[in-house]
């Protein structure tokens, strides 16, 4: 019995090394990045490319160097967030909401269930557990931002109430909704909003909106090509409504300032729904939307601050 176990162990060990050597021969492994004391290899980059393409298929058509840059930036962002999260959470135990997150991802990618998602991921050599880990990091990051900064969020409920009353009176029980995509961009040193806007527009014309969003947007929606989904007009600020009402479906807004950053919106579709509008329900949605908007801005600021203290070297 003991000999059989030893033989089985040797066989499994040989099988493991055979597969490892095959992988190394097929893809010569070398270090691409160092993030503090962690290394990122070219195989990690390949895996991240596959992940990004799985979320946004149009990325398969962009320049290889651009895709390489996207993958590197995506890994850097995830590693930095994870380093910060382990200060506050036990990542091994934080798995209770993973199933609901997978369900949400399945819907986002237009799959009916997790089984369909699993099959889809296999096409990109991705495992569902790897995706769960990524979703866990994003979810815990959002929780961390909420816990640290919710007291800094300021909501002028009276102002929102007055705004909502005006909109409801004007709408006459008709809800207007827009299906939107976004590119939220920041300015680097010596850049003007006009320069950056023109650069992004040129990239949209060359590679398409989704790919431009992946490359330029600092919003989490960038992984899905900037798609936000259906938004009730009453949840949008006056400055945004003013801009989107100027354009038709399929068109882009000018650069709209959002805090210290700027946003380009595209209207994918729009619709009008006849229904009795519940004031309290719409007010609740508006407050949540405003809180999330402020928390997202605080998240970007916090991440940039952390990143400044992380040593990153490209090899």
Image (spheres, rainbow, N blue to C red):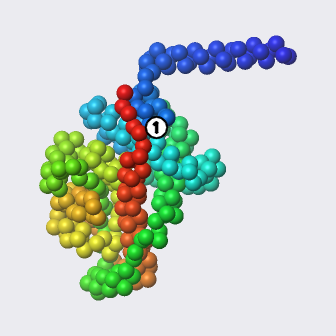
User: 223 or 168, which is in the foreground?
Assistant: 223
Work out whether 261 lies above or below 9.
Answer: below
- Which residue is at a point 56% across and 51% down the rendered structure image? 87
Left of 87 or right of it: where is 46?
left
Q: Locate residue 202: give its quadrant.
A: top left
Would you place residue 242 above or below residue 159 in this image? above
Residue underneath mark 1: 36
Q: Position of residue 174 (x, y in %)?
A: 31, 78
Vertical placement of residue 105 versus 281, above or below: above
Residue beneath the point at 28% across and 31% down:
65
Vertically, is 9 above or below 170? above
Q: Residues within 10 Å of mark 1 (few under 14, many from 20)?
A: some
Farthest right residue?
A: 1
Q: Looking at this view, is 45 or 180 the one in front? A: 45
Quadrant hosting residue 49: top left
Quadrant of the snapshot with the C terminus: top left
State the residue in front, 4 or 115: 4
The quadrant the N terminus occupies is top right
**What residue do we see at 82% from left, 13% from top?**
3
The answer to whether residue 15 is seen in the rendering is: yes
- The tally of labels here is 1
> Can you give x and y, in whole percent of width and height, for residue 121 in the image?
48, 38
- Is residue 123 something that shows in the picture? no
Q: Secondary structure at mark 1?
A: loop
Residue drawn where x is 47% and y is 48% of the image = 81
Q: Position of residue 80 (x, y in %)?
A: 45, 45
- Residue 287 in the image: x percent, y percent? 41, 75
């Amino acid at each position: 019995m003991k000999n059989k176990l030893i033989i089985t162990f040797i066989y499994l060990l040989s099988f493991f090394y055979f597969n490892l050597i095959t992988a190394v021969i097929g893809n010569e492994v070398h270090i691409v990045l160092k993030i503090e004391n962690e290394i990122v290899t070219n195989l990690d980059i390949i895996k991240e490319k596959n992940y990004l393409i799985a979320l946004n298929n149009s990325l398969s058509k962009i320049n290889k160097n651009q895709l390489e840059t996207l993958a590197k930036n995506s890994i850097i962002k995830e590693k930095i967030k994870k380093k910060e999260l382990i200060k506050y959470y036990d990542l091994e135990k934080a798995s209770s909401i993973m199933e609901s997150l997978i369900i949400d991802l399945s819907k986002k990618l237009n799959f009916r269930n997790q089984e369909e998602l699993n099959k889809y991921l296999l096409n990109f050599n991705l495992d569902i557990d790897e995706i769960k880990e990524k979703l866990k990091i994003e979810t815990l990051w959002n929780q961390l931002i909420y816990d640290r900064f919710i007291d800094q969020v300021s909501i002028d409920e009276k102002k929102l109430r007055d705004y909502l009353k005006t909109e409801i009176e004007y709408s006459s029980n008709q809800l207007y909704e827009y299906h939107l995509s976004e590119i939220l961009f920041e300015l680097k040193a010596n850049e003007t909003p006009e320069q950056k806007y023109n650069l992004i527009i040129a990239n949209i014309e060359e590679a398409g909106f989704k790919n431009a969003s992946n490359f330029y947007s600092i919003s989490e929606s960038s992984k899905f090509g900037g798609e936000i989904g259906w938004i009730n007009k009453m949840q949008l600020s006056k400055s945004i409504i003013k801009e989107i009402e100027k354009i038709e479906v399929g068109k882009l807004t000018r650069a709209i300032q959002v805090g210290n950053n700027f946003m380009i919106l595209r209207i994918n579709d729009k619709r009008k729904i006849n229904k009795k509008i519940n004031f309290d329900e719409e007010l609740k949605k508006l407050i949540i939307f405003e809180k999330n908007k402020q928390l997202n801005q605080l998240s970007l600021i916090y991440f940039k601050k952390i990143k400044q203290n992380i040593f990153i070297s490209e090899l």
